[in-house]
Image (cartoon, rainbow, N blue to C red):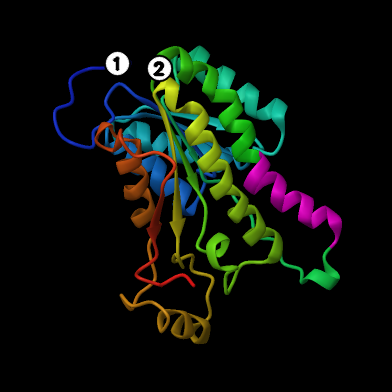
């Protein structure tokens, strides 16, 4: 099995000639990942619901000399996912890398949680990656090369200290989805891996909450979105071609029980 032809790589961890689609790209981890993959040479496709913000990020990337395409879509809706993928293939001809990053948390405790909230969180966090993978895999199979990277969470491994019930359940399901897809897609040269972030800086924690969380982290600091972005770059690269079905923990050293 040989990889799809691409230009010669001038350095490790380059994505020249590749097309990378990143969901949840309008802020946080998704935005950082889109910027890092673009800097590594990928033509980057930005997917999220916030069209105005996507256009602004795409404009910034283009002004920096990168190729970026904004594709507003709700990843929990099959029609919108398939439309974004079809538009990308029409404009760029291929999709090599999919980073399933879009996610929401929910807010209600179990005894107060509307069924709609449960369904919405699972729809974005778990059904979304399924729909996106389903839409991009036919193109990847034709190329005999692909990378699918699912951004899960330490909450899916431990139940979490900050995540809600549907958030933790959906992120746990994402690990299982990763393992099954990695087995099913390996014969086509497609790798599927997960990243499990710990507590990442979002600017939403109170001073008191921040201090209590940092005490749990052996490295003594919160992670930054770019920490996850560089993990995604590694998994997207040729250098990670023999890694599939794995979870890369990026959590500052928090041990999982």
Q: In which quadrant of the rendered view does residue 60 lie?
A: top left
Is there CB contact under 8 Å for labels 1 and 2?
Answer: yes
Give the alpha-carbon distance from disc 1 to disc 2, as whole Å: 8 Å
Q: Residues within 10 Å of mark 2 (few under 14, many from 20)?
A: many
Residue 47 is labelled as none
Residue 87 visible (yes or no): yes
Per the image, label 2 sits on a secondary structure element best described as: loop
The residue tagged 2 is 144
Q: Position of residue 204 (x, y in %)?
A: 54, 70
Q: Residue at x 57, y 46 (%)?
A: 176
User: Residue lying furthest left in this view?
Assistant: 10
Q: Is residue 195 above or below residue 72?
A: below
In the foreground, 56 or 43:
43
The quadrant in which the N terminus is found is top left
The residue tagged 1 is 2
Q: Which residues are magenta?
A: 114-127
Per the image, label 1 sits on a secondary structure element best described as: loop
Q: Is residue 121 magenta?
A: yes
Q: Residue at x 26, y 25 (%)?
A: 16
In the foreground, 52 or 195:
195
Q: Position of residue 92 (x, y in %)?
A: 44, 16
Q: Residues within 10 Å of mark 1 (few under 14, many from 20)?
A: few
Q: Residue at x 40, y 45 (%)?
A: 33
């Amino acid at each position: 099995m040989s990889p799809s032809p691409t230009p010669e790589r001038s350095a490790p961890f380059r994505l020249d000639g590749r097309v990378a689609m990143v969901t949840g790209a309008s802020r946080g981890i998704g935005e950082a990942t889109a910027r890092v993959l673009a800097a590594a040479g990928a033509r980057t496709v930005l997917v999220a619901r916030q069209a105005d913000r996507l256009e602004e990020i795409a404009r910034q990337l283009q002004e920096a000399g990168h190729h970026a395409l904004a594709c507003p879509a709700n990843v929990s809706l099959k029609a919108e996912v398939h439309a974004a993928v079809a538009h990308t293939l029409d404009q760029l001809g291929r999709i090599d890398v999919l980073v399933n990053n879009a996610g929401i948390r929910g807010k209600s405790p179990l005894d107060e949680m509307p069924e709609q909230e449960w369904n919405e969180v699972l729809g974005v966090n778990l059904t979304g990656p399924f729909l996106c993978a389903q839409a991009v895999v036919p193109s990847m199979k034709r190329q005999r090369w692909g990378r699918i990277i699912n951004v899960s969470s330490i909450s899916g491994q431990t139940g979490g200290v900050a995540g809600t019930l549907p958030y933790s359940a959906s992120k746990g399901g994402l690990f299982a989805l990763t393992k099954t897809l990695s087995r099913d897609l390996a014969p086509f040269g497609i790798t599927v891996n997960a990243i499990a972030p710990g507590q990442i800086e979002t600017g939403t924690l109170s001073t008191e909450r921040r201090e209590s969380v940092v005490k749990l982290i052996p490295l003594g600091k919160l992670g930054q979105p770019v920490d996850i972005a560089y993990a995604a770059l590694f998994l997207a690269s040729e250098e990670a071609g023999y890694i599939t079905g794995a979870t890369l923990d990026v959590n500052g050293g928090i041990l999982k029980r």
